[in-house]
Image (tube, helix red, strand yellow):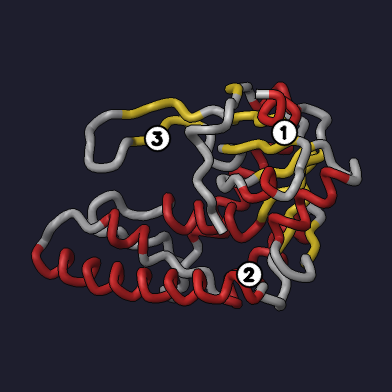
């Protein structure tokens, strides 16, 4: 659900090459949301689209970023959320829907005024069923394994890591650590040079490794 534990959790920056040969379970929905948010026009906030007007930001991100992981020797497994939304999360889901609706309205208003609209557009990002289907189809064409969790994909990633089926779980959120994943990798799919929001400043984003054992001893 995106519990922010950044100030409490020690992390260590690494290079993609440091993960070579490792199997990593990736929270697919979290990853694809990142692509939908980042791969947009820097002024209007419009996502990447094909000739028929269909959004393709998620497919572009999956293709190129996953290729980078493979080139680095990483063995990704994408884990999608299942059909069962936990009862405790339903209120959060409704709040997110409301926030996206409000962001979409502000996005449209900014476009009419000719103002920079990227931040509202990013907040309005929505992952639709067809996008998920297309993502799975692309992964299959690339020979990348994926699976559907019974419920939360991130919790499934943590379970796979606890069972040692994979070396680490990967997500921008910290939830898998809360449910006992021994190891979490952040920034796996967004490494590289990034522009800071509303600033003409760029930073280099690197993968971060978080070890549950270190957190508990600290």
Indicate the secondary structure of the residue bearing disc 3: strand
Asked which quadrant contains residue 14, the reply is top right
- The residue at which mark 1 appears reads as 212
Other residues around mark 3 within 10 Å, as few (<14) / some (14–19) / many (≥20) = few
Indicate the secondary structure of the residue bearing disc 2: helix
Indicate the secondary structure of the residue bearing disc 1: helix
> Would you place residue 103 above or below residue 157 in this image?
below
Can you see residue 20? yes
From the viewer's perspective, is 102 left or right of 190? left
- The residue at which mark 3 appears reads as 194
Report the Cα–Cα distance between label 3 and label 2: 25 Å
Q: Nearer the viewer, residue 55 or 205?
A: 205
For marks 1 and 3, give the one nearer the viewer.
Answer: 1
> Would you place residue 190 above or below residue 80 in this image?
above
> Who comes first in sequence, dot 2 or dot 1?
2
Residue at 29% in and 54% down? 119
For marks 2 and 1, give the one nearer the viewer.
Answer: 1
Image mark for residue 101? none
- The residue at which mark 2 appears reads as 132
Looking at this rendering, what residue extends furthest in the front direction?
Answer: 217
From the viewer's perspective, is 24 left or right of 198? right
Report the Cα–Cα distance between label 2 and label 1: 30 Å
Can you see residue 51? no
Q: Nearer the viewer, residue 103 or 141?
A: 103
């Amino acid at each position: 659900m995106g519990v922010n534990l950044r100030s409490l959790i020690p992390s260590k920056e690494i290079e993609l090459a440091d993960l070579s040969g490792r199997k990593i379970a990736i929270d697919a929905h979290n990853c694809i949301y990142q692509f939908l948010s980042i791969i947009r026009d820097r002024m209007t906030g419009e996502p990447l689209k094909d000739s028929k007007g269909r959004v393709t930001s998620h497919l572009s991100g999956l293709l190129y970023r996953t290729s980078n992981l493979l080139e680095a020797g990483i063995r990704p497994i994408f884990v999608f959320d299942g059909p069962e939304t936990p009862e405790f999360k339903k209120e959060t889901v409704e709040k997110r829907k409301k926030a996206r609706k409000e962001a979409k309205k502000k996005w449209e208003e900014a476009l009419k005024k000719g103002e920079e609209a990227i931040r509202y557009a990013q907040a309005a990002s929505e992952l639709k069923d067809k996008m998920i289907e297309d993502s799975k189809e692309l992964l299959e064409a690339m020979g990348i394994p994926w699976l559907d969790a019974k419920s939360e994909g991130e919790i499934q990633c943590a379970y796979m890591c606890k069972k040692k089926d994979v070396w680490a779980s990967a997500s921008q959120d910290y939830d898998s650590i809360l449910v006992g994943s021994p190891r979490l990798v952040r920034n796996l799919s967004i490494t590289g040079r990034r522009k800071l929001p509303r600033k003409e400043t760029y930073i280099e984003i690197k993968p971060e490794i978080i070890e549950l054992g270190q957190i508990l001893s600290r």
